[in-house]
Image (tube, rainbow, N blue to C red):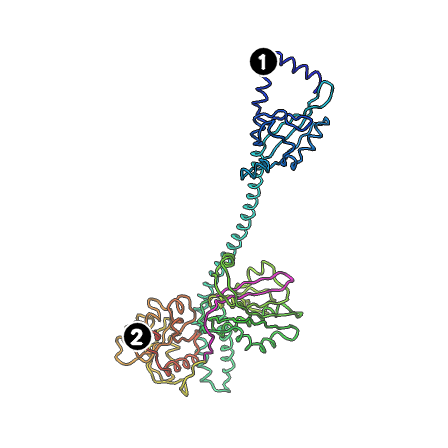
Amino acid sequence: MSSHDQQSIDARLRTVADPVRFLIDLFTLAPVGVAVWRADGQLLLTNPAFVDIFQVQPPPDYNLLKDELFVESGVRPLLERAFRGETVRVPMFIYGPSPRQLSAAGGGRRIAISMTLFPLLTKRGEVQYVAATYKDETELASSRELLALNESRIRDEALERGRAEVALRATEDQLRQSQKMEAVGSLAGSIAHDFSNILSVVLGYTETLLADLKPDDPLRADVQEIAAAGGRGRDLTRQLLAFSRQQVLEPKLVDLNEVFSGMTQMLARLVGEHIELAFVPGRDLGAVRVDPSQIEQVLLNLVVNARDAMPSGGKLTVATSSVVLDQDYADSHFGIEPGPYVLLSVSDSGVGMDAATRARIFEPFFTTKEKGKGTGLGLSTVFGIIRQSGGTIWVDSQPGEGTTFKVYLPRVDATPVVVSPATSSAASSRGSETVLLAEDDPQLRALVSTTLRRNGYRVLEAGNGNEALALAERYGGGIDILLSDVVMPGMGGRQLWERLLPRRPKMKVLFMSGYTSDAIVHHGVQKSELAFVSKPVVPRALLFKLRQVLDTPKLTGPKAI
């Protein structure tokens, strides 16, 4: 402080009536802690704010320099600097009360202090006292710390929000993709179902013509070409029905390890010597409930797809394992429920796929192959079979890094069984029994009726379920078997069978079906394991299946329904 400033303060103090009282009140009432130190380390004066901040006794009962609190906080060297004439300003944290008081009181607090030490000079220029001001910044420091914590929390919440938004967008993308696949599948299934009736007529009459034509007939080659084209159409129809999850399945308890083991040699020949084929079977795999022939088709299509992705060779690995998918996985993968699954993975070291390709690989007729090299139905067939079997399929792939298809099928706590196909005891497919035929497509109904009559059967024809029910009530003779389409206007085949069963308990049933949407599954045909023949209907297959059902002893009770 300059001499001019000192003179100005002295002059102003003289205007105060009682300058001593004024300075005492100022010292006492100041909102900051004030202390005056002597050179020997003793406190000369402290104001009430100092005592309140540090919760210590005022002098002369307390020697702050000898207290562990200030010694450990580094105050002593700061005082020494001030006694040498320096002004020292420091922020510091002090834990108070002192350790002595802390142990006695059993508690304490952290004090954030803004401290300023400055020398008090005598007239001879010697430092005999040091004054100190102490401002308690604890609340401010706590506020800053709280602000920092809030900022950290806000950042964490923002990151979590970002992750949630990414997950939500991924789920929305999966939902849109699923809805698109459902829409395409519904359209494909409807077309395939109608087309299967047309193919049944084409293939049926073609087979009849071939049976009637002599081997050297010049028309025979033309009819055979028609039959071949119809066969390709039948295969195409079945693939569309598989994709749309509307094909008829015959599920059984299956061990996927056994399925692959039985196909090893065939798959090895299929992929060729330039591709290394490896099988990694899982232990304690458990069983899955699938159609054995359809799961073989799944594996075959996935292996062929992997082979085509490695034209220059590579490694193809088929692996199985038993897994449990938790809720987190289910939340991030649309359409899957948590629980135990059997995982079938098919991995290749091929060219991989970009995001745009991955988004469309299960769509029917989508293919990355050259024109004429593929139908684009292989993976869509896989998709439909897996989804219809209660499972799900996902693909992991990046360009140049290969591809892995992961098929998850619900694990069943049961032992896989080998089911031998039933065989007919008849020497031929001919018969003399009475058949109640219910089919709403007139051309197909005419073909089936003609086929049955040519092979000795008596046929009662009806265009739908209601007609068949009325016809059966009017007919006075016995009816050996009901041959019915599953889905018909008004009354479906299953409902017809249930209405007829009380009146004709000995009558057997054989369903014709090309798909299962609202039919096999919803109508309970598949679940009750009733016999069916798949559309497109081929006369030989129909006659064989009809003879097989007629020659098999009829079940009674609930299992028959």
Q: Tell me: 5 left or right of 254.
A: right
| Frontmost residue, 132 versus 201 | 132
Residue contact between numbered discs 1 and 2, judged by CB atoms under 8 Å: no
In the rendering, at what x and y percent does residue 224 appear? Answer: 50, 80
The amino acid type of the residue labelled 2 equals: Leu
Q: Which residue is mark 1?
A: 18
In the rendering, at what x and y percent does residue 188 appear? Answer: 47, 65
The amino acid type of the residue labelled 1 equals: Asp
In the rendering, at what x and y percent does residue 465 appear? Answer: 32, 70
Q: Secondary structure at mark 2?
A: loop
The region drawn magenta spans 391-419
Q: Which residue is mark 2?
A: 501
Q: Secondary structure at mark 1?
A: loop
Is the residue 315 above or below the residue 431 in the image? above
| Frontmost residue, 123 versus 384 | 123
- Mark 1 vs mark 2: give the one in front: 1
The number of callouts visible is 2
| Frontmost residue, 334 versus 207 | 334
Which corner quadrant holds the C terminus? bottom left
